[in-house]
Each structure stands twice: as C-alpha cells, then as structure tokens.
Amino acid sequence: MAVSANDASTRDVVHAAKDRPAHEVVVVLLFGPLARALVRVLLPLRVPPPAVVLANVAAGFAGVVALGSGQLVLAAVLLQVKTVLDNADGLLARASGRVTLLGRYLDTEADLLVNAALFAALGVSTGNPWLALAAFLAVTAVLSSGFNLAHLQREARGRALPAPVRSGSAVERALESGYRTLYAPQDRLLRAFSTRRLERALAGVADPVARRGAELAYHDGRTLSYLANTGLSTQLLALGACLVAGAPTAYLWLAVAALLPLPVLQLRREALARRALRSAA
C-alpha cells in the first residue's frame, strides 16, 4: 500500500534501500548518501519516481553532448549528477511505496540508451570506434552478469525481490516489449549458463543437504562483490576521472578489462561448489 509523501518523509530513507547481495563501495560512500539527501527533499514534494528517471536521462544526454563538444570536465560532472539521480529514483520509489513495473523497465532501458549514446560519443571523440564498441559490449555484459547472478543468489537463499506493481498501461506494455527484445534473451542465456554449470558440478550427487550446501557455495559473495563494484555507478565515476584527466581512451581499456576476470570467477564458483560437496561427503 502506498504511503503519503508526508508520512514517508518522516522516516529514515535508509530503510528503503534495496536488498542487495553485495554492495558497491562508491554507492555506499558517495552516491548513496547524496541520493538519500535528494530523496528527503523530493518526498514531501510528491515527485513521481519516473520524473527522476527522466531527469537522470536528461543529465546523461547532456553529458554526452558536452563530451561531443570537447567539454570533458563538464561531461564528467554531468555524468556524476546522472549517477546520483540514477541511485535516487529507485530509492524514492521504495520510500514512497511507488515501486512499479513501468518504473523498473523505464530505468533499465533509459540506462541502456544513455550508455549507447555515451560510448558512441567516446568512439567519435577518441577516434577509436571499435574500441568504444568493445567497451560498450563489455560493460553491458558485466552489468547484465551482475544483475542476473544477484537474482539467482537471492532465489537460492529464498530472498527473491517482490514483483513490482503492474499498471497495464500502454506505456508499460511498450517498455515491457522493449525489455523482452533487448534484455530478456541475455537474461535467459546467462541464467541458463550459470544453472547448467552448477548442475554439472552437482552431477551424480543425490543428497539434498550436500546439493544445497554446494548451491549456496556456488553463489559466492566475492563474485557478486566484484560484479557490484564494476556496476554502473563505479563505471561512470571511473569515466569521469578519466575525462577530468583528459584520458577518455584509458577508460575504454578499463571497461574492456573489467570483463576479463569473469571466466576466472566462474571457474572459482564451480570449484567452491565441488569443495562444498567434498566437505559434505
């Protein structure tokens, strides 16, 4: 049930924080506190969360324009404003009791559009379009891996997030269709891959207690911590630092490099599952 903005504004919005299996350090230390301060201002004004998403998009595209015109420091600042707004929209939705499917789809697809424009601008400004494309794909893969592995970990621990409210509006249906086209295939692929690898590690094991222990070990915290700390807030802070330093190409290489540990982390997860099975034997 939705609460009034006046009632919600009197409680600590820290309690509206999203349940996450791992925390992004820059969000905990920097962007989270700024987002909470902003939400405390927005709650009494009854600002709808989608409006904050649109402000987030506007700041992101303003950063893209600044980057394209060579104003690197301004672009860096605007991208950090975007990050604060990006952290604030979901917090505002939870604090005000207005978590909706429309808002979730809008937020996700808005980030993709801004990221695509941002990496296109980086490709033009650095003269390295292929490196920018590789960086965009790497960042997309890392973010998608973080989202899906966190989802699987919550499911394994019985802490799946509640389904958001569905309005049935035409806008919601359009955004849902877009999500199914852009994200659903990679979500299915990543979850199926992770599940198959776990089942391979559990092959021939019938003991439900041993299987359960191995499953929990497989969804290990260090992998999720790495993925959380290569999340979008960290990515944009790193990009901002590179822009201020006048080295946008350096960020593109960093973005590509962020993908490289994933195969090693996957092998580690499987090794942890097998170790848990041996311990249970």
Image (cartoon, helix red, strand yellow):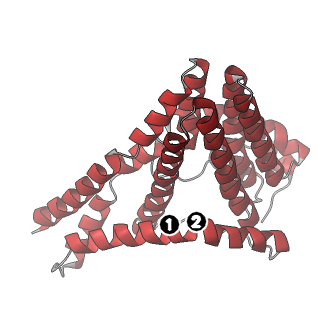
Q: Position of residue 127 (x, y in %)?
A: 57, 33
Q: Is residue 37 visible?
A: no
Mark 1 Cα shell of 10 Å, populated few (<14), some (14-19), many (≥20): some
Identify which amino acid the numbered label 1 is placed on.
Answer: Gln
Q: Is residue 144 visible?
A: yes
Identify which amino acid the numbered label 2 is placed on.
Answer: Tyr
C-alpha distance separating marks 2 and 1: 6 Å
Q: Which residue is mark 2?
A: 183
Q: Position of residue 122 (x, y in %)?
A: 61, 36
Q: Position of residue 125 (x, y in %)?
A: 63, 31
Q: Is residue 207 above or below residue 120?
A: below
- What number is the disc on residue 125? none
Point out the image quarter for the C terminus: bottom left
Mark 2 Cα shell of 10 Å, populated few (<14), some (14-19), many (≥20): some
Q: Nearer the viewer, residue 113 or 9?
A: 113
- Pointer 2 with pointer 1, Cβ within 8 A: yes
Q: Position of residue 42 (x, y in %)?
A: 83, 41
Which of the 4 image quarters holds residue 103?
A: bottom right
Which of the 4 image quarters holds residue 26?
A: top right
Q: Nearer the viewer, residue 213 or 65?
A: 65
Identify the element where label 2 is drawn. Answer: loop
Looking at this view, name the residue that lies furthest to the front.
127
Q: Nearer the viewer, residue 208 or 110?
A: 110
Q: Residue at x 87, y 43 (%)?
A: 44
Point out the image quarter for the N terminus: bottom right
Residue 72 relative to residue 279: left or right = right
Residue 182 relative to residue 211: left or right = right
Q: Which residue is mark 1?
A: 186
Q: Residue at x 68, y 20 (%)?
A: 73
